[in-house]
Image (cartoon, rainbow, N blue to C red):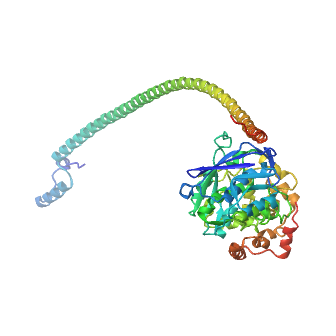
Amino acid sequence: MGLSLRPMMRFVGRVLVPARVRRAFLSRLDARYVTQADHRQDVRNIRDEFRRLHRETKDDRRDDAAAYATKESAKDIAKAIAKDVVKDVVSAAVKDAQRENQSLREEIVALRAEVRALKQLTATVNKANDQAVKGHRLAERTAEALDHVLQNEVRVWQAIDGLSAQTPATNL
Amino acid sequence: MRVKWTVADGIWNLTFLLDPEDDVTGTCTDGARLELRTNTCQIRLPKDRTSGADVHPDLLAVAAWTVAAPWTRQRVTFDRPISPALAEVFRTHWNVDAGPVGGDPRSGTRLAVSYSGGADSMAVADVFPDAPFVHFQRIRHPRVPNRWSFYRSDVLAGLAGETGRDVAIVQSDLELLLRLPGPGYPEHHAVTVGALLLADEMDLGGIALGYELGSRWLGGGRYTHHFTPDNPIWSGHGKWGSLFKAVGLPLVLPVAGISEAVTMRLALASDLRDHVRWCLRGSKGGGACGVCAKCVYKELIQAAIERRPLNTTVTADMPIARRWQEPPPYGGQEMIEYGVAHVPGIEHTMFAKAAAYLQATEESTRWLEHCYAPAIDEVPEQWRKQVDAYMVDNVGLMTEDEARRVETWET
């Protein structure tokens, strides 16, 4: 920052310096140092700058706080959502499990009924099978018995033919 | 024995009545004990081939004889007169008094193949690519409850029909006449009843069957298990061969000189191979059952000719494999020898014990890859050349040493 030497020059006293040189010197001096007005302006500017920065800092802090709050609330929301989702999922799973449980129970009931029916059927089939085996055995024996009947028929005709050959023809 | 035929709409019904000396027990020509169940059977000819009632009495007589022979002791009385020549064969070869006698003998010209659908008859079909087929299909007997529904004769008839050849499918319940040992032909020749009843209609002069080396010459199956030049079942001059010759339908055995290994090789190389089936239990789409005795036996032969390991789920501890855990003799033993000698890894199969007993090698079984020439000589003259050419071209004849293996066969 520039300090003006003009006031100082008042007390230095008048020295015999040609006006032209003095003017030249002063103008050169002025060119190198700011004026008082400029300085005041600078101070104002600096103060404004300071205020602006201070304000900005305040704003930043506020923004940071807001951002933090947002982040925290996002976290909360996420947590809440997660909680809700888990809750939904869990409750859906529970419902599914309950449904499945129910259908399994129904299935068990149906299977028990089926087992009962199969047991009954097995009993019926076993009975039928026993009857079939007996029937088959009977058929075999009947067929074998029939074999003897058929064979005897051959023998009977053989005997009849033999007898009629021996007996003289009779007039009926 | 008194024999009666009736016919209506192509269905021939046979009834035979026993004379006092006859019996419901008897013996098949192969030696098996038999017991009669009933005395009626039917033979259904294809609708488009029925010749009405116009079948030569000699043919009807021999057809009836294939089911009546085991029960007949002294004489047989047919319902229409047979030719003197046929009556003479009954007298000389069977010691049976057959009549009434009268009428002329018959003759025909063409050869038909008695085609079962197995490898052996397929090989015969390959020798005679233009010959018509006559296929026997078992049907149920109206008087006998069917306890053998696993027997899929319908599947085999279907396969025969798909061969694209001229096939006459003849249905009959005659196998149910037999009570013991179970349903089957009372005599092996009963399989020809269709050919006999169609012989006039189709102008047949011979019936070709798939009996191979083992059946004709080695006494295989239920028979004697040694070399049998005079085999009464299949030899041309035996009691059955003479009977068929007398009715103008001589038995022709085109593959009697070759083993089942060769008939299978020929069948699997023939254009009919997609229709081959030697199992009676398989389904239409599912193929052979793979676990019956027949399937196991045929798989051994097929694995041998294809030089590959046995492909089967049957193991030594299963009932079906029991016979192979015991020492020989085995039915069809020459083929067991061939199989154990050629199948790689046989020591890890149900045949391990049989292989150890038999000690067969590729060298010791090489004779089974060639044709026994006397079998060709036995083919009636009009078809001999074709059989001879086929065997020379496709198989090759046995050397003297190899033929000696046939003639000294004893299990």
In the depicted structure, whether residue B355 falls above or below residue A139: below
Tell me residue B355's x, y (percent).
84, 59
Quadrant of residue B382 in the image? bottom right
Left-right relation of B400 to A161 = right
Left-right relation of B233 to B162 = right
Left-right relation of B201 to A81 = right
Judging depth in this view, the residue of B53 and B124 nearest the camera is B53
In the depicted structure, whether residue B261 falls above or below residue B34: below
Quadrant of residue B163 in the image? bottom right
- Farthest-out residue, left: A19
Quadrant of residue B82 in the image? bottom right
Tell me residue B243's x, y (percent).
74, 61
In the depicted structure, whether residue B243 falls above or below residue A133: below
Tell me residue B251's x, y (percent).
72, 64
Q: Which quadrant holds the C terminus of chain B?
A: bottom right
Left-right relation of B40 to A80 = right
Judging depth in this view, the residue of B162 and A121 nearest the camera is B162
Judging depth in this view, the residue of B175 and B6 nearest the camera is B6
